[in-house]
Amino acid sequence: MRPGKKQFQYKQTNVSIFLRKIFTCIFISFFIIGNTQSDASEKVIIGILAKRGEQVTFKRWQPLAKYLDQQVPGYHFEILPLDFDHISNAVANHAADFFFINSGIFIELEMKYGVRPIATVRTLRGDKGVSLFSGLIITRADRTDIRSFKDLRGKNFAAVKKNSLGGWLMAKRELEGAGINTDHDFKNFIFAGTHDAVVYKVMQGVVDAGTVRSDTLEHMSRDHLLDIKKVKVMHGDKVHYNFGLGEKDFPFPHSTDIYPEWPMVKLASTPDELAKKVAIALLNIKGDEQAAKQAGIKGWDIARNYQPVHDLYREFRLGPYREIKHLNLIDVWGKFWPIITSLLILLGTLCCCLVILMHLRSRLIKANHRITHMAMHDPLTLLPNRRFFRSLALRAFSQARREEWKVYLLLIDLDDFKVVNDTHGHEYGDALLRQVGNRIRIVLPVDEGVGIPRNKAVLPLHKQATSDGVLRAEDCVARLGGDEFSCLLIHVQNLEDALSIAERIVQAIEKPFDIFNRQFFVGASIGVSVYPDDGDSLDELFKKADMAMYDAKRSGKGTYKTYDKSSG
């Protein structure tokens, strides 16, 4: 081999070795830099109230920590599940940088430790996200003995925790507003610890009813822990909408007022710059991202106004309002007695004027009630008239549409009434109509009746019935005109039950009527239509019921028929 060639190979070998060393150094440098950056990531802890237990909470919210790792560079986020009893100590000891807590705990920590909300969660309800929630009072769907809040007296009841907003305080406010003494009216009362535990105790029959926050049933159903069809949500006498919202904005079952959802809050010691980055990352979460889907939320909103929660806690003197200092009246009198004396004289004068004004107002209200009653009731039978019946029906349709149950309309026409009226005169006819109206609503026994005075105005929709009447507390009977009456059956389980009521009305009217010591016989033909199956308006239901009623007359009178779609 020639010397030149050997020298060239030697130089090539040295170059290769040199390049390999350079690439090795570069690789090691990147590795060291990468580890240094990873080690330099600052740990950020998010404490989360474990309303359904620590394991479920960690599983739901761990993807959020990973999402924030990506969206907020230079920080590593970790989830710390905390139960109700450890939240306050965790905030006091700075165990976390951010906390995701319920609205009631937040207002107490806000005033005690200066925590501030940076965002409000939007929970997933169906396919819609809402940053509001409510409380549910639930029982098993097969408990026909529990229909209203008043039925809970003497029953076993379960809640989550004493200081749980959605798991007790909301329901406590509604129950006490309905006349239930939550300290004495229950047979047994227990705190189950978690929302899931309350549902389990209700479904297992350990308690008769319980209260949880509004999205608990959906979460348990989604996790295959509950058949939601076996649960019945109870509703009070009033519909609640805060924040200027209506049915379309919060179209979900709720037993209580609605309140702002849980906030994500920062401690006073958490840097504002970090809080700003976290808030922006939360607001940018989309509903289809893993962090949202795993948590069962739709995303986050700008922090809401939590004044309604303050109002509730102030009413019960809870949280930051539990300690109210008492004034020393002797000291106040010694210092301000001239002003107090002047105010008492002024107050006495105002009271005299107020008494006079209240007397005049009372007379005006009574006159207005009489006028309103005359406008809304039939003067002969004292039943609701067509105008009042329409108002009650529209309200019932709205509630049925929201809660997905049916309303049954019974159109009742008397058979052979014209013979009595034409033969014996209007005096006999009017007396017969009065007895028919009274007989429809009181002659047959029902469960769950509410007493109604005889020969007095029919009560409003939620009170109308009697302990021995055909119609129940939520049903309505009205006189439409002439010899025509109408009934509205609400919360009837099925068509067979509605037809059973129609059969009892027919049998009641077939019995003889004693008028001025003489007996008269009439019958009744009844047409039945169903909302929303036969129509979504009252006029359409009247039309279908009228067709069914004439079908009953053609069948021989004294019977009832349902609307036949094939004949319409």
Image (tube, grey):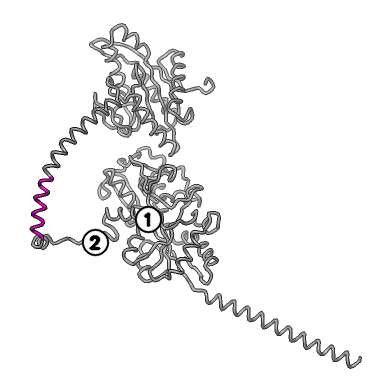
Residue count near mark 1 (Cα–Cα under 10 Å), binned few <14, some 14–19, many ≥20: few
Q: Position of residue 471 (x, y in %)?
A: 34, 28
- Give the residue at x 59% y 79%: 33
User: Was residue 520 drawn as part of the magenta stretch in this picture?
Assistant: no
User: Callout 2: helix, strand or loop?
Assistant: loop
Q: Is residue 555 left or right of residue 447?
A: right
Q: Quadrant of the N terminus?
A: bottom right
| Residue 106 versus residue 417 in the image, above or below | below
**Mark 1, secondary structure of its residue:** loop
Q: Which residue is mark 2?
A: 323
Magenta residue span: 336-350
Residue 296 visible (yes or no): no
Q: Tell me the amino acid under the disc marked 2.
A: Glu
In the rendered image, residue 441, in percent from the top left (x then y), is placed at 31, 25
Q: Measured along the vertical axis of the image, is residue 68 above or below residue 371?
A: below
Residue 384's image quarter?
top left
Residue indicated by mark 1: 305
**Which residue is rendered at x = 37% and y = 55% of the image?**
305
